[in-house]
Amino acid sequence: MTAFVAALLVGGLWVGNALTVVLFRALVVMIVCYPIGLLVGTALQRVLDEDIEAYKRAHPIPGEQDDSSQSADDGGNAPSAEGS
């Protein structure tokens, strides 16, 4: 949307271009910038997720267990005190 507004204002109305030309150019710029923003946002989200996971591994909260640390053979259940 920022690219649309920038193209609308800077590339058109202030220079005196016709409204249809300005809207067409703004629409083209918005269509081109959308996938770029999507890729940048996806990359930043992945980096953020990796940083959060690394921080959680480096600074565990005492008393909390990670789901991946539970073994598959006991179904994720802790051994009971009854010895069954």
Image: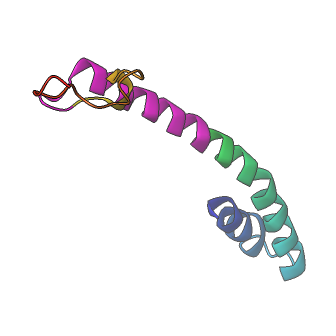
Q: Is residue 79 above or below residue 20?
A: above
Look at 66% across and 47% down and name the residue there: 38
Which residue is pictured at 44% across the width and 27% down the height? 50
Q: Residue 10: x, y in percent?
A: 69, 64
Q: Is residue 28 left or right of residue 3?
A: right
- State the image coordinates of residue 20 (x, y, percent, origin top left): 89, 79
Residue depicted at 35% across the width and 24% down the height: 74
Q: Is residue 30 above or below residue 15?
A: above
Q: Which region of the structure is painted magenta?
A: 41-64
Q: Residue at x 33, y 22 (%)?
A: 69
Q: Can you tell which quarter of the image residue 27 is in?
A: bottom right
Which of the pair 84/67 is nearer the observer? 84
Q: Position of residue 75 (x, y in %)?
A: 38, 30
Q: Nearer the viewer, residue 39 or 61?
A: 61
Give the overall secondary structure of the magenta segment: helix
> In this figure, which colouring scheme has been used for the structure?
rainbow
- Judged left or right of residue 28, residue 38 is left
Quarter of the image with the N terminus in it = bottom right
Q: Nearer the viewer, residue 11 or 29?
A: 29
Residue 73 image offset from top left, x and y in percent: 40, 21
The quadrant in which the C terminus is found is top left
* In this rendering, position of residue 38 left or right of residue 32: left
Asked if residue 84 is positioned above or below residue 44 in the image, the reply reads above
Q: Is residue 47 magenta?
A: yes
Query: Is residue 35 inside the magenta stretch?
Result: no
